[in-house]
């Protein structure tokens, strides 16, 4: 337990340093971190690249996890959108993770956020993992 607390503190210190270095403020998915246009592009890419496994409604099929709803929210609660982008970067699509550009993967996450009823905003979700790590996934608006 002590190790986990030290790891959490180290992560918090790193994140605070990253925020200070970039001059950016940490955001949450409630801060409008994608645009409607990006989510629309993401919906098209999702249908083509992801829906065959994760289903058109993002509910999953028992093997491929759902990408919307309470189970998805619980799995990603407190993590960052960058963590999600990194997971997708290294593992999706499973047959060839390098087949999709990072911008398309960010668009797909924008679609996922929209389906999960997070608000769109003025700026697109970044396709760089480190920038996306400054956006925290919070299922409830606090």
Image: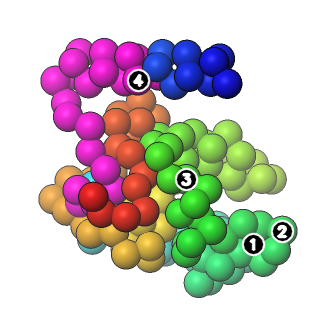
Mark 4 → mark 2, Cα distance in angstroms: 33 Å
Q: Which residue is mark 2?
A: 63
Q: Residues within 10 Å of mark 2 (few under 14, many from 20)?
A: few
Secondary structure of the residue carrying numbered label 3 = helix
Secondary structure of the residue carrying numbered label 2 = loop
Q: Position of residue 142 (x, y in %)?
A: 27, 58
Q: Which residue is mark 4?
A: 12
Q: Which residue is mark 3?
A: 76
Q: Which residue is mark 1?
A: 53
Secondary structure of the residue carrying numbered label 1 = helix
- Above or below residue 42? Residue 133 is above
> Within the magenta stretch, is there residue 15?
yes
Query: Residue 75 vs residue 45: left or right?
Result: right
Q: Residue at x 82, y 74 (%)?
A: 62
Quadrant in the picture for residue 3 = top right
Mark 3 → mark 1, Cα distance in angstroms: 19 Å
Mark 3 → mark 4, Cα distance in angstroms: 17 Å
């Amino acid at each position: 337990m002590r190790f986990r607390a030290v790891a959490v503190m180290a992560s918090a210190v790193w994140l605070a340093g990253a925020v200070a270095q970039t001059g950016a403020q940490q955001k949450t998915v409630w801060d409008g971190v994608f645009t409607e246009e990006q989510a629309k592009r993401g919906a098209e890419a999702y249908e083509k690249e992801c829906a065959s496994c994760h289903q058109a409604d993002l509910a999953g099929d028992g093997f491929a996890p759902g990408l919307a709803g309470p189970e998805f929210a619980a799995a990603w609660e407190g993590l960052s959108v960058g963590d999600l982008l990194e997971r997708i970067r290294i593992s999706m699509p499973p047959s060839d993770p390098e087949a999709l550009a990072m911008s398309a993967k960010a668009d797909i996450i924008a679609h996922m956020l929209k389906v999960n009823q997070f608000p769109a905003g003025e700026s697109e979700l970044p396709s760089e993992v480190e920038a996306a790590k400054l956006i925290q996934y919070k299922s409830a608006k606090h």
